[in-house]
Amino acid sequence: MIVGLAVFLGCLVAITTGIILTRMKEGPISGLVFGIVNIFQTIPTIALLAMLLPLLGIGLKPAVFALFLYSLLPLLRNTYSGIKEVDQGVIESARGIGYSSMQRLWKIEMPLALPFILSGIRLTTVYIISWTTLAALIGAGGLGDLIIAGMANNDNFLIFTGTISAIILALVVDFILGFITRKNSEQSQQAN
């Protein structure tokens, strides 16, 4: 639940922001946005969770918010790069046949950028699964509870159970999202 919520919120904000930034001229605003989002990546997870405790309390809220912040950079970067990498000749052709800016975005640019965006979602989701184990430190639950309980009780079985479960979850999700990404890429290539 924590992973899904953080990734969903990250997609909502980062993909929208990425689209908006591609519509602006290169300049200080995109540099500022990427600079701020980059800063979130440099803050250690435990430190960010600790900083959020006084603001959001213990439990789900600070965990989801921290993981949301971590999700922004790969999603934003992949959305921005994916749209910017669309061949200008294709965009000019769409403009030439009378597509509006919104039609070009939704019928040309987004479908062509989708493999980049899906790759960002895949990367983000796997990262978030691993970082979620630390959310147990602030009472958010999840597989991290097994790891923390195992450490507190010097119980290697609990530690390994939590760790292996998190690894398996990350691998399964990575496999599923990788499959979806490959299928989308194949469909995009067939359409071209």
Image (cartoon, rainbow, N blue to C red):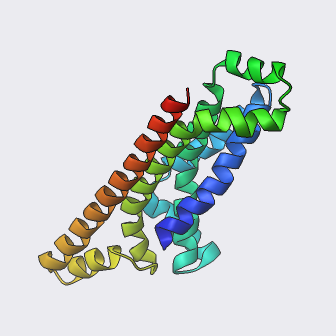
Which quarter of the rendering shows the C terminus? top right
Q: Is residue 179 above or below residue 58?
A: above
Asked whether, in this view, residue 161 is left or right of residue 179, the answer is left
Farthest residue toward the left?
156
Spot occupied by residue 24 in the image (x, y as percentages of width and height):
80, 31
Q: How many marks?
A: 0
Query: Residue at the spot x=58%, y=56% of the render?
Result: 69
Asked whether, in this view, residue 117 is left or right of residue 170, the answer is right
Work out whether residue 170 can be spotted: yes
Query: Residue at the spot x=57%, y=42% of the render?
Result: 38
Given residues 10 and 43, the one toward you in this image is 10
Q: Quadrant of residue 93?
A: top right
Farthest residue toward the front?
190
Given residues 102 and 174, the one toward you in this image is 102
Q: Is residue 184 above or below residue 170?
A: above
Asked whether, in this view, residue 49 is left or right of residue 91, the answer is left
Q: Is residue 128 above or below residue 190?
A: below
Spot occupied by residue 29 in the image (x, y as percentages of width and height):
77, 35
Q: Quadrant of residue 46?
A: bottom left
Asked whether, in this view, residue 127 is left or right of residue 30, the answer is left
Query: Residue at the spot x=47%, y=61% of the render?
Result: 47
Farthest residue toward the top?
89
Work out whether residue 51 can be spotted: no
Spot occupied by residue 100 in the image (x, y as percentages of width and height):
86, 32
Query: Residue at the spot x=45%, y=56% of the render?
Result: 125
Q: Quadrant of residue 94?
A: top right
